[in-house]
Image: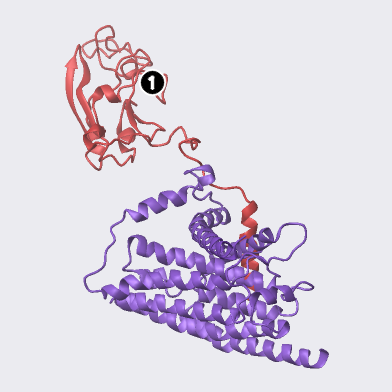
Amino acid sequence: MLSSIRTLWYTFLHLFHRSETVQYPEEMPYLAPRYRGRIILSRDPDGEERCVSCYLCAVACPVDCISLQKTEEDGRWYPEWFRINFSRCIFCGFCEEACPTYAIQLTPDFEMSEYERHNLIYEKEDLLISGTGKYPDYSFYRVAGLAIPGKDKGDAERERPPVDRHGLLP
Amino acid sequence: MNPIVFGLLNIVGILLALVIGAALLTWIERRLLGFWQDRRGPNRVGPFGSLQVVADMIKILFKQDWIPPFADPVVFVLAPAVVMVTTLMAFAVVPVTASIGIAGDMNIGVLFFLAMTSLSAYSVVLAGWASNNKYSLLGGMRAAAQMVSYEVFMGLALLGVVMLSGSFSLAAIVRAQSGLWFVVPQFLGFVVFVIAGIAETHRLPFDLPEGENELGAGFHTEYSSMKFGMFFVGEYIGIVLISAMIAVLFFGGWQGPLLPPIVWFALKTGVFVGFFILLRAALPRPRYDQLMAYGWKLMLPLSLLNVALTGAVMLTHW
């Protein structure tokens, strides 16, 4: 009986507590920089696409919502098309973890509702952004040992020249 | 003014105020529950969300009004009307102020109030029975047992007030409190009456007839649309009725300094309506056997003790 009255009093005191509610559309909640929201494809600092079509994201995706097609141009690999079905995506972030070139990244944005389901299928031009995302300085082709036009083997950052296996000098 | 016109104005005014007030209470309740749970409650429609009622009304009126094929259609339709009619009828004897009120001076006011609240038990029982559904029936049976047993000492709790004021008329009871509110000499009666009132309106924590987590929704499981709405408006009018009765019987009704009498009445009633909502926010529901044991083993002896003590004091000191 007494505890009931005490409960009543404590509940009444909550009238003077601050409300926990965040008034969402007017007042945005804070989303951490590494929040797992809408997926984007980033570019390297030179403005080239980072994605090298290795298919690792599509393999890692537990709900198979990523599909893409590799194509090649001047020794660089690109996705011919890149498609993410966001009506399937569970925003687990495995694609981001699998990506060897930091190309695919999850962003702090979740406001992507659509009235029609097929509008949730994002094509490459919807996914590509003009910036570098979370890793501003990384450029795959600058650090990779792959020869592309304008950068021969051994020219990459912190890469020694290739060993001449036919030479006699030590 | 012509007394007939005045009487009609009284009736229409009280009726409108009650129905609109009961509808608004749905919003007030949700808002207050929100505050007490550190939320905000409905605050989107209209100023502070006050037009939420209108939105809810539109929605509930456009819902399909469905009578299940296995139900007893006549009783099924009748049941929600009974609760509205009886609780509204009970308001006829509540003296809002000395002049406002339909039959505040009726010489059997207290008895009329008790009779009407007892009749409203039929609504719940009939709803449970006509739904032809075991959960509804269980809810209806619980309501019947609960209301009948709490009815007993609700009447007994009022006896002390009736003895002190020497009248069954509610207006006379209010006038008898001009010196001292009856809550002071009749504190025990007040506590018992409040608890019986909660059980009578089957509000939380005594809402066992509904008992969402064990009976679905109890007696109104099969109800939809405005018939469901009627049960709820009826329940809210019941809250206002019990609150008004607490104010009239124990807190001096319309009497108070400075402010006009109608404001005092509304204020006192409002405080108890708020208290009812606070109860819902704070207390868990007891088990059914606990509820019955509590009623018969604790509240009934207490109310009898109250009557006996009041009688003894009156015999020795008057």
x then y, percent, for residue A14: 62, 55
For disc 1, the chain is A
Instruction: Compare residues B78 and B46 and report the one nearer the observer.
Output: B78
x then y, percent, for residue A158: 38, 16
**Residue A77 as seen in the image, left or right of residue A154:** left
Q: Disc 1 marks which amino acid?
A: Thr
Query: Chain B rendered in what hue?
Result: purple
Q: Can residue A104 be seen in this view?
A: no
Instruction: Compare residues A106 and B36 and report the one nearer the observer.
Output: B36
Q: In which quarter of the image is the N terminus of chain B?
A: bottom right
Chain letter matching colour red: A
Local crowd size for mark 1, using a 10 Å CA cut-off: few (<14), some (14–19), many (≥20): many
Q: Name above or below for residue B43 compared with residue B262.
A: above
- In the picture as drawn, the residue positioned furthest to the front comes out as B2
Q: How many marks?
A: 1
Residue denoted by label 1: A132
Q: Is residue B225 visible?
A: yes
Q: Quadrant of the C terminus of chain B?
A: bottom right
**Residue A148 as seen in the image, left or right of residue A33:** left
